[in-house]
Image (cartoon, rainbow, N blue to C red):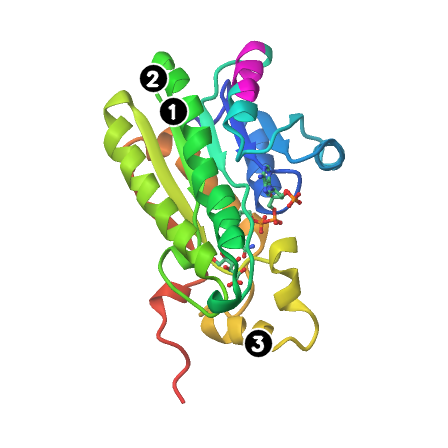
Amino acid sequence: MQELFSLQGKVAWITGASYGIGFSIASAYASAGATIVFNDLNQELVNRGLEAYRAAGLNARGYTCDVTSEEQVNTLVSRIEQEVGPVDILVNNAGIIKRVPMIEMTAAEFRQVIDVDLNAPFIVAKAVIPGMIKKGGGKIINICSMMSELGRETVSAYAAAKGGLKMLTRNIASEYGAFNIQCNGIGPGYIATPQTAPLREPGHPFNAFIIAKTPAARWGTPEDLQGPALFLASRASDFVNGHVLYVDGGILAYIGKQP
Ligand code: NAP
Ligand code: GCO
């Protein structure tokens, strides 16, 4: 069983993984034997990430790259192939959210969210798939959301992007499954990271709202995603394709507390 879940000898690229969910997933992969590559927007964030991996006793290589730039992504893929080796596992983790009522949101803001949360996973997956085909297979894991299934006030762009990402996941699985590429999603519930920090400020009503909506009665932690992410990156999931694994403490199963 240990061998089935091992990532020994694999190269894993996790986007936007200096901290938060990406860092947690990358740490799990490193502990399972993978060589970790991550990128972030600027050198300061990359340095912060490198320091965090070092402090955790893990090896990782960090690069600056904006995942919305096809040119930067293609350059980085060539660099990774030369300096580390072809990518076996890709986690499309980098993401942003803008919480703005839809009728107040500018088209430019909407486009920016779609660009990072949907166009970038397309750009990055497109860049690594040829190497995976050459190598005989690979794993792509797209970080989706509750908003791949549900809507809520103020997150129209994010929901549109994450809903689209679910379908991009299914399409990559459909188009490249025959090349032994498995593309799956993880749909985290509400996880305590910098992205959700504004919703968890003391006294913020959203905090109690989420705890009431979650059968597990708590926010998730980045560590809650490690086991599911390892499963989807390892041989253990070789016949799982086009699936979104929701790791949400039961939110999607629950109608809400009875009055
Ligand atoms: P986070 O704490 O905000 O981390 C996201 C990371 O992505 C940051 O390091 C960020 O850099 C980076 N990033 C943003 N835009 C980028 C770009 N264009 N190129 C490269 N890197 C970029 O978010 P998180 O909560 O860990 O979330 C990680 C993923 O999980 C996201 O896709 C998010 O939508 C998804 N998710 C989160 C939750 C949750 O409850 N936290 C739930 C479901 C899904 P900066 O620091 O410069 O912004
Ligand atoms: C929000 C949140 C969410 C979460 C997550 C849920 O404002 O509703 O930020 O969208 O981050 O994606 O799965």
Image quarter for residue 62? Answer: top right
In the image: residue 207, left or right of residue 147: right
Residue 77 lies in the magenta stretch: yes
Residue under pointer 1: 138
Q: Position of residue 164 (x, y in %)?
A: 36, 48
Residue under pointer 2: 133
The residue closer to the viewer here, 224 or 171, is 171
User: Does residue 253 lie above or below 69 as drawn?
Assistant: below
Q: Badge 3, how many Cα within 10 Å: few under 14, some, many 20+?
A: some
**What secondary structure is found at the residue carrying circle 3?**
helix
Residue 148 visible in rendering: yes
Q: Given the image, on which type of amino acid does mark 2 rest?
A: Ile
Q: Which residues are magenta?
A: 75-82
Residue 227 visible in rendering: no
Image quarter for residue 57? Answer: top right
- Marked residue nearer the N-terminal end (2 or 3): 2
In the image: residue 98, left or right of residue 250: right
- The Cα–Cα distance between marks 3 and 1, rounded to whole angstroms, is 40 Å
In the image: residue 21, left or right of residue 102: right
Residue 187 lies in the magenta stretch: no
Numbered circle sitting on residue 240: none
